[in-house]
Amino acid sequence: MERVAIFPGSFDPFTVGHESIVKRAIPLFDKIVIMIGYNSNKRSFFPVAKRELWIKEVFKNEPKISVVSHEGLTVDFCKKVNAGYILRGLRTSADFEFERAIAQVNKMMHPQIESVFLLTMPEHTPINSTIVRDIILHGGDASMFLPEALNRVDFKAEE
Ligand code: ADP
C-alpha cells in the first residue's frame, strides 16, 4: 500500500524549518500532502490562498509533494485522502509536550494513523512563524528564515 503522509500546519508563513522537515521526509513516504489548516473564524496573517501558492512554488519540482488547504480535523483529512501518517517537526520539549497530547488523542480515536516526528536541524530550532511574521511586519529582512524559492516574493506587500 502507498505510504501517504500529511504534514499539517498553519504555515503562516512557511519557513526554512518547515521546508527542511518536508525535504527530509521525502525518502520516507510515497506521497506527502502539505495541509494548510485554517479556521475561518480566526484571523491569520497571510491569506490561505497565498500560503498555498508559496508552498506550491517551493515544491514545484517535487512530484511526491502536493499542497492543499483544509478546515477541520487533520484526522478527517487523513481519511479523505487515505493517509496513514501525520508528519510533525519537533524543536523543543515544549513542542514535544504539545505534540504528545495531540498524537496520543489521535491514536486513541484513530488507531490506524501513526504520527511520525522528525527532530529539527539544530540551526532551525529557534525559527518559528510568529517571529518571522514579526520581522516581516516591522520591515526587517526575514529572507534567511524563508525558503530560497521564495526569495523574490515581496512579503511586506502581501500582508
Ligand atoms: P501549527 O500551528 O500546527 O503548530 P506550524 O506552521 O507552526 O503549525 O508548524 C507545523 C509543523 O512544523 C509543526 O509540527 C511544527 O512543530 C513544525 N515546525 C515549525 N517550525 C519548525 C522548525 N523551525 N523546525 C522544525 N519543525 C518546525
Image (spheres, rainbow, N blue to C red):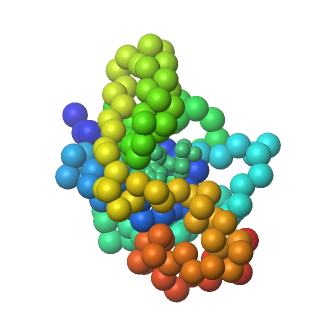
Labels in figure, total: 0
Q: Residue at x 58, y 50 (%)?
A: 10
Where's residue 21, x and y in %?
A: 35, 54
The answer to whether one can see residue 126 in this image is yes
Q: Nearer the viewer, residue 41 or 101?
A: 101
Give the vertical position of 106 relative to 126 (above or below). above
Residue 154 sits in which quadrant?
Answer: bottom right
Where's residue 76, x and y in %?
A: 53, 30
The answer to whether one can see residue 65 in this image is no
Give the vertical position of 133 relative to 66 (above or below). below
Where's residue 4, x and y in %?
A: 32, 41
Quadrant where the N terminus sits is top left
Hey, which residue is sitting farthest top in the picture?
A: 108
Q: Is residue 29 left or right of residue 136?
A: left
Where's residue 19, x and y in %?
A: 39, 61
Q: Residue at x 65, y 46 (%)?
A: 38
Residue 156 sits in which quadrant?
Answer: bottom right
Residue 53 sits in which quadrant?
Answer: bottom right
Q: Residue at x 63, y 35 (%)?
A: 72
Give the vertical position of 79 relative to 17 (above or below). above
Q: Residue at x 37, y 26 (%)?
A: 113
Quadrant where the C terminus sits is bottom right
